[in-house]
Image: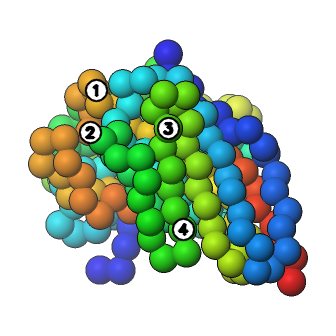
Amino acid sequence: GESVGLHLPTLSVQEGDNSIINCAYSNSASDYFIWYKQESGKGPQFIIDIRSNMDKRQGQRVTVLLNKTVKHLSLQIAATQPGDSAVYFCALEYAGGTSYGKLTFGQGTILTVHP
Amino acid sequence: DTGVSQNPRHKITKRGQNVTFRCDPISEHNRLYWYRQTLGQGPEFLTYFQNEAQLEKSRLLSDRFSAERPKGSFSTLEIQRTEQGDSAMYLCASARGTGNQNYGYTFGSGTRLTVV
């Protein structure tokens, strides 16, 4: 079955450092991957996404890398700021499903940025 | 319309009582999703609507749970005879979708349910 997991549950960095959050998945048929940020008391907020026909995508201060060979996804945050402190989730959508937009989430990584 | 709205934000109920949550999606969004999130975990899919049709229900959605979207706009999620294990954050998301493409997939801030 589908499962999505994270290598590290917590990550502490200093302001200005780069952060890398990792995610492993098991369903090789997954074709759409998303990273979400969730702050306390709020719903998940979209950060960046990538489809399976790509291996890298960049946004503002964020980069997502996809390695389909080893079923691994990572989120890189450049020049991490205190406002980046939150829980980060990877999520995936299974291409073969008929419920479009049905997401499977990983456990989450708590990112703490120290000033 | 500024986003997905969920009400109430918090609900405390006694075990055995029924509760109902409401989700108002972004107005032009035809797809609506309910998820449940327990502490320290990622959201888990519960059910999915396209317009007024409920197209999939997770095994997590026991017989005590029912969701509706009668006019293809707002949706309600009802839990009957609540149990302590139902305590969680219930999240709603909506998107504008055609076929296998979704646009503007947005989560609400959730309803936090505590069953005492």
Question: What secondary structure is marked by label 1?
Answer: loop
Q: With respect to residue B41, does B110 lie above or below? A: below
Instruction: Tell me the quadrant of the picture where the C terminus of chain B can be found.
Output: top right
Instruction: Residue A50 in the image: state x and y as whole percent.
Output: 38, 51
Q: Which residue is identified by label 3?
A: A67
Front disc: 2 or 4: 4
Farthest residue toward the bottom?
A115
Q: CA distance from mark 2 to mark 1?
A: 7 Å
Instruction: Tell me the quadrant of the picture where the N terminus of chain B can be found.
Output: bottom left
Front disc: 1 or 4: 4
Question: What secondary structure is marked by label 3?
Answer: strand
Q: Is residue B83 visible?
A: yes
Q: Quadrant of residue B57?
A: top left
Q: Residue at x 29, y 31 (%)?
A: A95
Q: Left of B48 or right of it: where is B108?
A: right
Q: Amino acid at mark 4?
A: Val
Mark 2 Cα-neighbour bin, 10 Å: few <14, some 14–19, many ≥20: many
Q: Which residue is identified by label 4?
A: A62
Marks 2 and 1 in Cβ contact (< 8 Å) = yes
Q: Amino acid at mark 2?
A: Tyr
Q: Which residue is identified by label 1?
A: A97
Q: Which residue is identified by label 2?
A: A100
- Lower position in the chain sequence, tag 4 or tag 3: 4
